[in-house]
Image (spheres, rainbow, N blue to C red):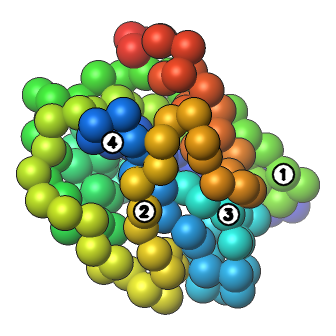
Amino acid sequence: MESEKIGVGVGVFLEKEGKVLLGRRHKDPEKADSELSGEGTWTLPGGGMRYKETPEETACREVKEETDIDVREEDLVKVSATDDRTEDAHFITIGFYCDEFEGEAKVMEPDEIVEWKWFDKNDLPSPLFKPSEKLIKKVKKGVKLL
């Protein structure tokens, strides 16, 4: 029997002038690169942790790799964590909130994310990637500490 494992990653709610940055995942499941079947959905920047990396280090690295935006660890606020499962995957996502960063969003991984857009927090696109949707709801409720 194959051993089961839990994946761990981060999602980062970047806010600018009342808007949140979301990326649209590729419609092709092979390119969308998610064990949680997120093809065609809108997602927060983020991704999987590496061995010996802190959640904050992961958040800064993933935002930079995906968007070319620079985030400093000291500007991140832990928001929440989600526990998401499908028939084939189990993933814990640590959510962060950040409203201080530098740079403009660029598509850095076009095979995975086809575009980045800023959306009003109260007028979000659909469908949202489930872990991102859960984290966004927490931030909208005003929960900014884990």
Disc 3 to disc 1, C-alpha distance: 16 Å
At horizontal 36% and vertical 23% (from top left) the residue drawn is 78
Residue that badge 3 annotates: 41
Sequence-wise, the earlier of marks 4 and 3 is: 4
Q: Which amino acid lies under the numbered mark 3 shown in the image of this protein?
A: Thr
Q: Which amino acid lies under the numbered mark 1 shown in the image of this protein?
A: Thr
Q: Is 45 placed above or below 41 here?
A: above
Mark identifier at residue 86: 1
SS type, badge 2: strand
Disc 3 to disc 2, C-alpha distance: 13 Å
Residue that badge 2 annotates: 117
Disc 1 to disc 4, C-alpha distance: 27 Å
Q: Which amino acid lies under the numbered mark 2 shown in the image of this protein?
A: Lys
Residue that badge 4 annotates: 14
SS type, badge 4: strand
Nearest-to-viewer mark from 3 and 1: 3
Query: In which quadrant of the rendered view does residue 68 lie?
Result: bottom left
Q: Considering the image in quadrants, where does the C terminus appear?
A: top left
Disc 3 vs disc 1: Cβ atoms closer than 8 Å?
no
* Label 4 crowd (10 A; few <14 / some 14-19 / many >=20): many
Residue 66, given in percent of the width and then of the height, sits at 33, 68
Sequence-wise, the earlier of marks 2 and 4 is: 4
Q: Is 101 placed above or below 139 here?
A: below
